Amino acid sequence: MNTQDTELQNAFQDIEDISDLPRSEWLGCVRSLGDELGYFQSLGDQFSAVFLDEKPRLLVSFDTFERSTERTDKGYPLGMELASQQGWSSLTLLAHSSDDNANWFRSKKIYRYFDRLVDEGFFEDFDQVVFYGAGACGYAAAAYSVVAPGATVITIAPQATLESRLASWDRRFPKTRRMDFTSRYGFAPDMIDGAEQAYVFYDPRIEADAMHAALFHKPHVTNVPCRLFGSDPEYEMIEMKALAPILEAAMLGTLTPRVITRALRNRHFNGGYQRRLLSELAAGARPYQTALLCRHVLRQRKHAPRFRKAYEQAVATLDEKGIPLAAPLNKMEQA
């Protein structure tokens, strides 16, 4: 680890929590950090770019004021925090206005910004580049990855487009229907053609997300179904500490299906996933599987009344059917 790397990591260890600050003050703190460790550049009233310099690896991420203040320890953009922990450079594109349409980063100012980076050979200075984003930010990560051929793209529940001719079935964003998704950097699945590898994480039970994922049907794209992760898989992956190791492996060039499976295995200890799984099992009247799940949860934590009640009901049903349960809870675990 070199001196600058230490300074970058120390800077993030010492910064104050800005998650509760008003939007303007929050942006001021982000600007100050960028000015100190790299640069901060305004891209109109709605967007900014923040670069923190620590070659030779670069994480390019897209984030918003709301996501940053809700999902990170100290309220700074997620990609910026993750990169700083690993000693990577980070380029963070921020949508910080109150206009939800900004979240897709469809702006000529951003087009020109990336054009300039390409003209300057900015991405050629890095040995490895990873583009990351989730939801609308995932769309942007895929769409703008075209500027760095050979990059790896990690997206979570991204939209492929919201152009009415191709995605009229996605009615979740009515205010965005009038936005232009046909001009430059428009159709995200085409923009990843130059990527080395691209990964699309999504919950197949969320129909619109599954349909968008299906549009990313390129030979170098790996679709990763994350069943029961819900409409916001990024939040679940952060909670179960699965996102960081996936991004780390992508940056090191070691991301494989086995690495992904190992990281997502943490869902077995995630409360949100466990509750959704219990609801699915109960709806399907599967007492044996319900008992196994509840036993697993109750051995992790005693105060889980919902699971305890479901366990007792499942065991009673199994007793009525004369089906024994292997290794039931002992008396101490039942207490």
Image (tube, rainbow, N blue to C red):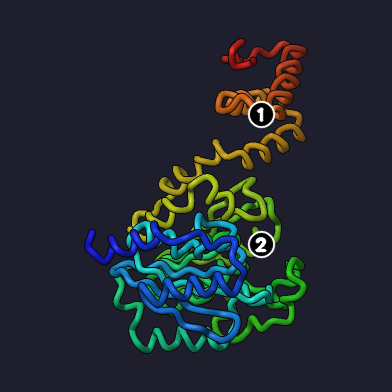
Residue 84 found in image quarter = bottom left
Judge whether residue 189 can be spotted in this image.
no
Quadrant of the frame with the C terminus: top right
Residue 169 found in image quarter = bottom right
In screen coordinates, is 185 left or right of 148?
Answer: right
Disc 1: CA contacts within 10 A as few (<14), some (14-19) or many (>=20): some
Amino acid type at mark 2: Met
At a point 59% along the width and 16% down the height, the residue shown is 333
In screen coordinates, is 29 left or right of 126?
Answer: right
Reply above or below: 128 against 70. Answer: below
Disc 2: CA contacts within 10 A as few (<14), some (14-19) or many (>=20): some
- Residue mark closest to the camera, 2 vs 1: 1
At a point 72% along the width and 26% down the height, the residue shown is 310
In screen coordinates, is 310 left or right of 156?
Answer: right
Judge whether residue 46 can be spotted in this image.
yes
In screen coordinates, is 67 left or right of 252?
Answer: right
Q: Secondary structure at mark 1?
A: loop
Q: Which residue is mark 1?
A: 304
Q: Secondary structure at mark 2?
A: helix
At a point 69% along the width and 77% down the height, the residue shown is 163
At a point 72% along the width and 10% down the height, the residue shown is 322
Residue found farthest to the left:
2
Q: Which residue is mark 2?
A: 211
